[in-house]
């Protein structure tokens, strides 16, 4: 028990191993993992291409992403202490939505060999496009409900709780960023004006057409802006921000300054703010038609400012925590 003037310096521990993870989410993660193996084989031996990239790359990338997403969300739900039944149902809706998305991606891209996103050129293409949009709405609403639940729940210590809340909030923003892609490109506007049909509406790239030179594996444009980067980073804050909290717990075993909840919570907030800044930076860069691998002066200046602010804020937290720890030790 602590007294006035002291702070708690017990070594924090990792969350207990969950007795039961959300089975539907784990099942979908397992199915996605199998699809990863199929995608690797397909990418190696199927020479078909779509928009200049191997046809199996899209199912492969989405399978990896969805597997990680499902496992992380299943872990979050295992930490719930309130309204667990509602959380289970929301997790089940996420699992069903993601399973449907995987089936749509494989069916439209790998089996039919057709573009999925932005493609409404035939009734079947429109059907797949609309089904994909519907499943995304279902997943978004379910994750939103889980985020609201965990905002009022208290899983783990304070730093871990806030890492989960901030991760869920950032991933919801990341999902919304996908809507920035649904704007007609200049070439599409000309085609729509000429034919009166919206066969294709929207694109990943800015300043260049989709299907041009891209980075290995990700396919992100190396000649223009690419809105997928910020979208991807935002969604996968779900894994990265809680990893910061878990990493700080491990570091606290060696560094007493990190043992109190206060400094670790502050560092989690700083990391989340820096990550949100990175998401904004990549979207801002893409919207200016600038490739990730060819940053301009404005982008480099913004990135440097973000890095400097993050470093200064982190050091300030650590210096203050060290002084407080030393003062508490002197008091005892």
Image (spheres, helix red, strand yellow):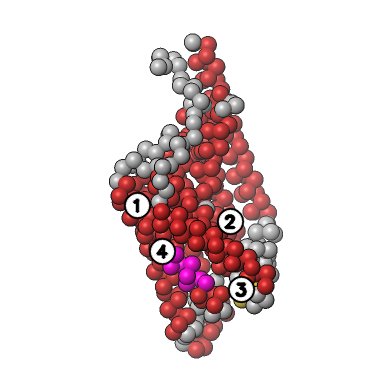
Magenta residue check for 105: yes
Coordinates of residue 161 in the picture (x, y in percent): 42, 39
Q: Residues within 10 Å of mark 1 (few under 14, many from 20)?
A: many
Between the C-alphas of marks 1 and 4, the distance is 14 Å
- Against 160, residue 254 (above or below) is above
Between the C-alphas of marks 1 and 2, the distance is 34 Å
Between the C-alphas of marks 3 and 4, the distance is 23 Å
Q: Read off the residue under disc 1.
A: 88
Magenta residue check for 239: no
Coordinates of residue 155 in the picture (x, y in percent): 39, 39
Tell me whether the residue at label 3 lies in contact with that at label 2, contact meaning CB atoms closer than 8 angstroms. Answer: no
What are the residue bounds of the magenta stretch?
99-106
The answer, for residue 302, to whether it is visible in the render is yes
Q: Considering only order in the chain, which callout, 4 or 1, is on the residue closer to the N terminus?
A: 1
In-image side of 151 versus 320 (left or right): left
Question: Residue at image x 46%, y 36%?
Answer: 15
In the picture, the quarter occupied by the N terminus is top left
Q: Secondary structure at mark 2?
A: helix
Coordinates of residue 46 in the picture (x, y in percent): 65, 75
Q: Read off the residue under disc 3.
A: 55
Q: Read off the residue under disc 2.
A: 282
Q: Considering only order in the chain, which callout, 2 or 3, is on the residue closer to the N terminus?
A: 3
Point out the frontmost of discs 1 and 4: 1
- Against 136, residue 83 (above or below) is above
Q: Secondary structure at mark 1?
A: helix
Q: Residue 229 falls in which quadrant of the image? A: bottom right
């Amino acid at each position: 028990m602590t007294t006035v003037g002291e702070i708690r310096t017990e070594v924090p521990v990792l969350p207990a191993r969950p007795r039961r993870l959300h089975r539907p989410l784990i099942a979908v993660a397992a199915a996605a993992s199998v699809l990863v193996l199929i995608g690797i084989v397909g990418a190696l031996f199927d020479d078909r291409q779509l928009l200049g990239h191997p046809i199996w790359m899209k199912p492969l990338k989405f399978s990896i992403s969805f597997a990680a997403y499902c496992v992380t969300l299943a872990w979050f739900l295992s930490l719930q202490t309130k309204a667990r039944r509602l959380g289970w149902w929301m997790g089940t809706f996420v699992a069903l939505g993601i399973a449907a998305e995987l089936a749509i991606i494989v069916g439209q891209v790998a089996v039919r060999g057709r573009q999925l996103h932005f493609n409404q050129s035939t009734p079947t293409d429109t059907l797949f496009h609309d089904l994909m949009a519907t499943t995304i709405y279902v997943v978004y609403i379910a994750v939103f409900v889980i985020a609201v639940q965990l905002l009022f729940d208290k899983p783990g210590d304070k730093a871990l709780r806030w890492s989960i809340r901030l991760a869920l909030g950032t991933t919801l923003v990341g999902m919304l960023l996908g809507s920035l892609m649904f704007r007609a490109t200049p070439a599409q506007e000309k085609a729509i004006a000429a034919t009166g049909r919206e066969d294709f509406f929207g694109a990943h790239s800015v300043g260049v057409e989709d299907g041009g030179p891209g980075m290995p594996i990700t396919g992100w444009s190396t000649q223009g802006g690419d809105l997928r980067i910020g979208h991807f980073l935002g969604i996968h804050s779900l894994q990265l921000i809680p990893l910061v909290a878990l990493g700080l717990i491990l570091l606290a075993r060696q560094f007493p300054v990190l043992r109190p909840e206060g400094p670790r919570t502050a560092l989690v907030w700083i990391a989340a703010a820096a990550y949100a800044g990175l998401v904004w930076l990549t979207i801002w860069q893409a919207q200016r038609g600038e490739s990730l691998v060819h940053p301009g002066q404005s982008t480099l200046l913004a990135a440097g400012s973000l890095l400097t602010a993050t470093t200064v804020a982190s050091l300030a937290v650590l210096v203050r925590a060290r002084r407080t720890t030393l003062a508490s030790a002197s008091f005892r």
